[in-house]
Image (tube, grey):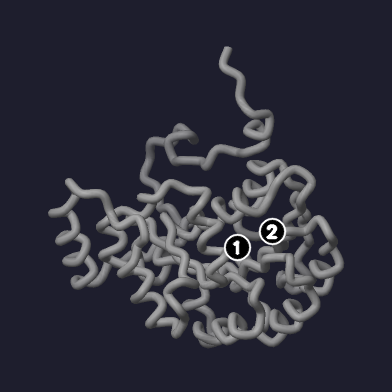
Amino acid sequence: MIEFNRRVEDIPVYPAADSYGYDGELVKLASNETPWEPLGAVQEAAAQAITTLNRYPDPDKSLMRRRIAERCDIAPGRVTVGNGSCEILLAAAEAMLEPGAEIVYAWPSFSMYPHLAAMSGARGVRVPLDGEGRHDLEAMAAEVNHATRIVLICNPNNPTATAVSIDAIDAFLAELPRHVAVILDEAYVEFSLAQDPDESLDLLRRHSNLVVLRTFSKIYGLCGLRAGYALGSEQFRLAVDRVRQPFSVNAPAQAAA
C-alpha cells in the first residue's frame, strides 16, 4: 500500500455536491458566488487570451502586478499574484511554517486556515471570536510568542460577516514583534460598510510585517478563473515565488484580472 504523509490524514477533503448523493436541484450558497456574469470587457479580455493558449502564461504576472500596483499605489515588487488568494495562503505557509512553529487565527473563520497548520506540521492556535462574533485581537495578541510565524485576520470575517476597525488592527500590529507576519485577509472588504476598501492600504506604509490579501473571486465575479493577490514586502513575494510552480496563474485569468 502506498504510504502518505501522516499529516494528510488531518486535512479534510473539500466537499462537493456529488459527495452527498443528492440528485435533486441544488442552490449553492456556501461559496458566496455572485449571480451575475463578469463585465463584457472582462469576458473579451479573457477570450482574447484564449487565442494564445499554445503559449505558457507570463510566469512573473508582470502586467497584472503592474495594474494592481497602480490601483493600490504601491511598488509592483510588493505585489504577489496567485491562483486565487488561497494559493498565496498555501505558499506563505510553505515558506514560513514548519514543525514547532505556530500560526494564530480566530475561530470560526475561513475553513482553509486549519489546513495551513496541518499541511506544514505547525501548531494551529485557534482563538474564539468575542461575544459579538468579532476577532478578539487582545486574546490573539496574548497567544503570540517566539514560535509564532503567522497571524491571520479575516476582515470582514468569513462566515460571521463581522469586522474590526482599521484603528484596532493598527494598534494590534504595533504590539506584535516584527518577525510575525500578519496576513489581513480581505476577500470581502468591498462588501463592507464599516470601512473604505483602501483604508487598510495605509497600514502597509507603517508595518513591514503586514500582508493584505485580496481576491477577484467575490465582488469581481471571477472565481471560475482563480485570481488573487497580496500586498506586502518584496521579501514576502520572493519567498512565495520560491515555493510554488511558476505558471500558476493562467493567461485568461491574468488578462481578465
Position above or below: 204 against 213: below
Can you say whether 169 is above or below 249 in the image? below
Q: How many marks?
A: 2
Disc 2 to disc 1: CB gap under 8 Å: yes
The one of 68 and 142 positioned closer to us in this rendering: 68
Sequence-wise, which precedes: disc 2 or disc 1?
A: 2
Residue that mark 1 sits on:
159
Q: Position of residue 116 (x, y in %)?
A: 63, 49
The local secondary structure at tag 1 comes to loop
What's under tag 2, amino acid-wise? Pro
Q: CA distance from mark 2 to mark 1?
A: 7 Å
Picture residue at 73% right of the left edge, 65% below the top? 180
Q: Which residue is mark 2?
A: 108
* Quadrant of the rendered image containing residue 152: bottom right
Compared across the picture, whether 37 is left or right of 192 comes to left
Outermost top residue: 1
Judged left or right of residue 177, residue 48 is: left
